[in-house]
Image (cartoon, rainbow, N blue to C red):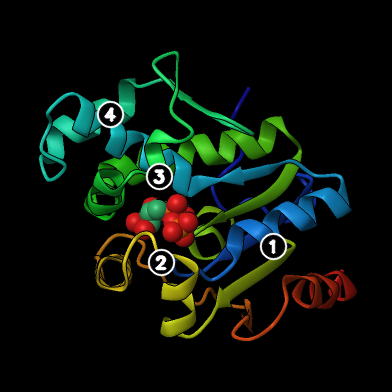
Amino acid sequence: MTRPPASQPPGTLGRVIAIDGPAGAGKSTLSRALARHLGLQRLDTGAMYRAVAWGAITRDVDPGDHEAVATLARTMSITVGDRVTADGKDITEAIRAPDVNRAVSVVAANRDVRTIMVARQRQWAEDHRGGVVEGRDIGSVVFPHADLKIYLTASGEERARRRSEEGSDWIARRDHLDSTRAASPLEVAEGAKVIDTTGRSIKAVVEEVLAWL
Ligand code: CDP
């Protein structure tokens, strides 16, 4: 069977909702609520990049070693659902650790890692007949024909407050790396609806988005 091309038009994949935005914008809360309301599965693509970063750290591989990290991405078996596993281990909590926060944006800037992850994300959507997918490049690169694209943001102050355990300097550093990298930088995808969640309850944001569907 021939695989559908990357820019498959809408309708052939099932419904896809793309949610992008910087750290602490509220993507996970919104994607969970939308998936529940719409009866769709949810994919946290950040967890996939985090799993590769975790793989590098636990094997003493330099996150900046392009070839070694690409090989890891190619060979690690990663599952992302309610729990995250890699190499048969439950790493749901481990991928939120400070050392992973610090390494993940370097791993995610690796073009070969991205190619591998994007292929897996498209396969996931095919297998699940669509879904709510959150990340940094979902509306721009992974699913440019998504049925709905949302770019979620919030003030730097509020995002740092929501992620106080990571620290505002590290969040700012990660956002900078994610927005300035050459390969699929974080940006507002063409046709995306921009929602600023600063000072808003997630309930209000979910209601606003559901009203569009
Ligand atoms: O939850 P938070 O927004 O803090 O981060 P995440 O979604 O878990 O993503 C962790 C990191 O993975 C981001 O800082 C990006 O470097 C990378 N990422 C990416 O490059 N592309 C994606 N589609 C998702 C995440």
Q: Nearer the viewer, mark 1 or mark 3?
A: 3
Residue 32: tell me if it is visible: yes
Question: Would you name the residue on which mark 2 appears?
Answer: 164
Which kind of residue does numbered mark 1 sit on? Leu
Ligand 1 is found in the corner quadrant, namely bottom left
Q: Pointer 1 and pointer 4: residues touching (CB < 8 Å)?
A: no
Tell me the mark number nearer the camera, choosing from 3 and 2: 2
Residue at image point 35% right, 46% down: 114
Residue that label 3 marks: 96
Which element is circle 1 on? helix
- Residue 193 placed where, x, y %? 66, 80
Mark 2: is the Cβ under 8 angstroms from ligand 1? no
Hey, which residue is sitting farthest front in the picture?
A: 165
Q: Which mark is residue 30?
A: 1
N-term-proximal mark, 3 vs 2? 3
Q: Which residue in the structure is indicated by mark 4?
A: 55
Earlier-in-chain disc, 4 versus 2: 4
* Residue count near mark 1 (Cα–Cα under 10 Å), binned few <14, some 14–19, many ≥20: many
Residue drawn 12% across and 45% down?
64
Which residue is at 60% across, 28% downward?
A: 2
Q: Earlier in the sequence, mark 1 or mark 4?
A: 1
At mark 3, the secondary structure is: helix
- Location of residue 3 by image quarter: top right
